[in-house]
Amino acid sequence: MKIYLVGGAVRDSLLNLSGSDRDWVVVGASIEEMLALGYKPVGKDFPVFLHPKTGEEYALARTERKSGKGYKGFTVYAAPDVTLEEDLQRRDLTINAMAMDDQQQLVDPWGGQRDLALKHLRHVSPAFGEDPLRVLRVARFAARFAHLGFVVAPDTHQLMCNMVEEGELEHLIAERVWREMDTALGETDARVFIEVLRACGALHVLLPELDRLFGVPQPPKWHPEIDTGLHTLMVLDQACRLSNDKTVRFAALMHDLGKGTTPTAELPRHIGHETRGIKLIDKVCRRLRVPTAYAELASLASQFHTHCHQALVLRPDTVLKLFESLDAFRRAERFEKFLLVCEADARGRLGLEDEPYPQADYLRQAFKSVADLNVPDLLREHPVPAGPQAGEAIRELLHTKRLQVLRAFVEQQRSAPQ
Ligand code: CTP
């Protein structure tokens, strides 16, 4: 039996990157031998084991052949006679299809080193086409390695286009799509993930609500970049710059979906896009089973981003209504994330990338002034009689007091020298 380090760990060590999980492939062994050595079996669909001490994954070398639609339609063959080269050949990209033995000798039958030097994400063989999830993986790796100059190789791009054309992506289950998307949102260049999906037609299949924004105009006075799709990518870029939080980045991507359903006669204005967006976001989130924290922030950002942009001229009661609609008093952390999405939106415009966004600080301060109100103190000053109406009376008292404080805040801000 011979054991090799494979996949991402080999790739990343050649790129001088650290942090990737170590995966191992075992050649020349049977399941029985692995069990006798104390490895713990974990694979349902193929033989994978955990090392008894390190807990790292050890897979028997295997070949896979597609035998039906969807990701479960594979015939797996794992036996001691499967060679390392055969195992590497079934993998997605050449840069992921290298192995290293215990003497640090690299095994690279499919040109991984060449493609690392060329900075090409290239499929190993036509078997790439057997797993449609790989289209998303390539987009994700393109985002991950964009800062190093990696691009999708032209023939791989063509293969991805063909897979989309043949309807392969329609067989992907929501959880797998979301997992890739979620990981991609963690990359600083998450924008590239969307661009690669769009270029091969996959965005149209996976996120038609987003794909539709490309080609939709906005008023040049507010949006010098004009195109709504382009604006959305710029907002995503800004969100990545402002925050590592993936819910903020997802909301940035979703905040203008409503602009995709503006009646043509109204263009380039987008009256009511904020509310129209909510339904579309809901549709996306249900279809892809997006976690609630992402869905909620995206929906609030869609509904209230224009309010936030107008913060400096809002009436005190509108500011309070905004806080209440955002449930900011109970969800202060989410409120902060909302402000980041709005800031990303304002800066995700051509030539305005480094403009200040005073609205966010204004609302932060306004919020702090009312959030600091102490309910027990308030009740000492204005006792509320006990009884079935007490809850409602306290709510009203709090509302009135908050409004008072906000009025004073707004007045003070407006009279302060600029
Ligand atoms: N792999 C593949 N096709 C897939 C999934 C995985 O060919 N659909 C192969 C690749 O060789 C990959 C290895 O399995 O390198 C391990 O997969 P995974 O851990 O998902 O990716 P890594 O390349 O290790 O990247 P990451 O840094 O994201 O873990």
Image (cartoon, rainbow, N blue to C red):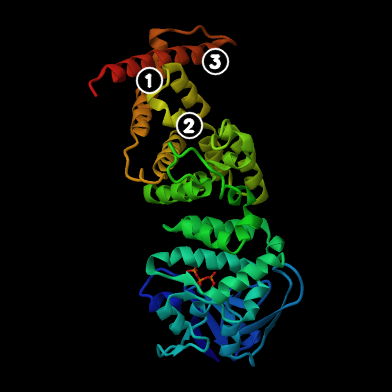
Disc ID at residue 306: 2
Label 2 crowd bin: few (<14), some (14–19), many (20+), radius 10 Å: some
Answer yes or no: is residue 50 visible.
Answer: no
Camera-nearest residue between 217 and 88: 217
Q: Is residue 405 above or below residue 170?
A: above
Q: Position of residue 283 (x, y in %)?
A: 66, 44
Disc ID at residue 373: 1
Q: Is residue 193 above or below residue 260?
A: below
Quadrant of the image for the N terminus? bottom right
Q: Position of residue 410 (x, y in %)?
A: 35, 18
- Under circle 2, the secondary element is helix
Disc 3 designates what residue?
A: 391
Tally of numbered discs: 3
Camera-nearest residue between 295 and 204: 204
Judged left or right of residue 28, residue 106 is left
Answer yes or no: is residue 410 visible.
Answer: yes
